[in-house]
Amino acid sequence: MSSTLPVESANDIANNLAEAIAARKLPPGTKLREEALCRLYSVSRTKIRAALLILSKDKLINMVPDKGAVVSQPSERESREIFATRRIIEAALAREFTAKAKPADYKMLEKHLKEERNALSQVPSKMRQQLLGDFHVLLADVVGNEVLKEIVRELVGRSSLITMLYQSERDAACSSDEHSAFLAAARSGDADKAAELMLHHLSHVEAALNFDVNASPTKKDLISALLM
């Protein structure tokens, strides 16, 4: 296995790190050391800093004085605010999706649901949280509003960190079931029902979060984690 990853730009590096965070390879609290990233991607420190700045703007990492970049570890208050925001945005998204989705879109999303269920059957599943979040981004993709898609992608990315810390595997399985129920309502053309199910789904995810658990991250070697 190669000890470096092929990249072309700071955006490539940022995207690769964002995917690793969403896939649980880099748990919240993980330190992203610049020198290690320079070796991993075979690029200059300037390019690594540009990538970290992109992730910081997306709230996926925090830049801590004298400590450098750390994968975000959201508080309970921040977590609840994110889900409140998602409910406002995604209720409207559900209606737009119902109005615009074509048979090919439903076929694509049904395939995605199968991938979710396959991931849920694996313990642990590196792709589980990423796939559950991607479902919502795919809905925005179908709607075709690039600004909306960008907003949903950021919120979903931040939500993935939250559920990574505070959601049980059982609740992750419930999320996939609720995705399926939403899709059935949208396919029937019932926009009100689809919006209601989306609100229920997001509220259910939030209600199931356990903020009393010990959220201390497991220490991992950064390079090994990214090469997995």
Image (spheres, rainbow, N blue to C red):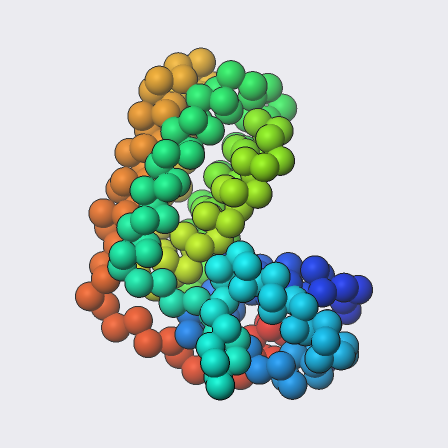
| Front position in the image: 139 or 110 | 139
Q: Is residue 170 visible?
A: no
From the viewer's perspective, tell me whether residue 68 is left or right of residue 198. Answer: right
Q: In the image shown, does 45 or 1 lie closer to the viewer?
A: 45
The C terminus appears in which quarter of the rendering?
bottom right
Q: In the figure, residue 94 lies in which quadrant?
A: top left
Q: Nearer the viewer, residue 174 or 11?
A: 11
- Quadrant where the N terminus is found in the figure: bottom right
In this picture, residue 149 sits left or right of residue 165:
right
Task: Residue at 37% x, 41% y: name it.
Answer: 85
Judged from this view, the residue extending furthest toward the left is 212
Q: Is residue 170 above or below residue 67?
A: above
Q: In the rendered view, tell whether residue 145 sits above or below residue 3.
A: above
Q: Residue visible at 65% across and 67% down?
A: 51
In the image, taking residue 6 as reference, residue 217 lies left or right, namely left
Residue displayed at 55% across by 59% down: 57
Look at 46% across and 77% down and name the residue there: 64
Q: Position of residue 204 (x, y in %)?
A: 26, 42
Relative to 208, is 216 above or below? below
In the picture, residue 223 is in which quadrant? bottom right
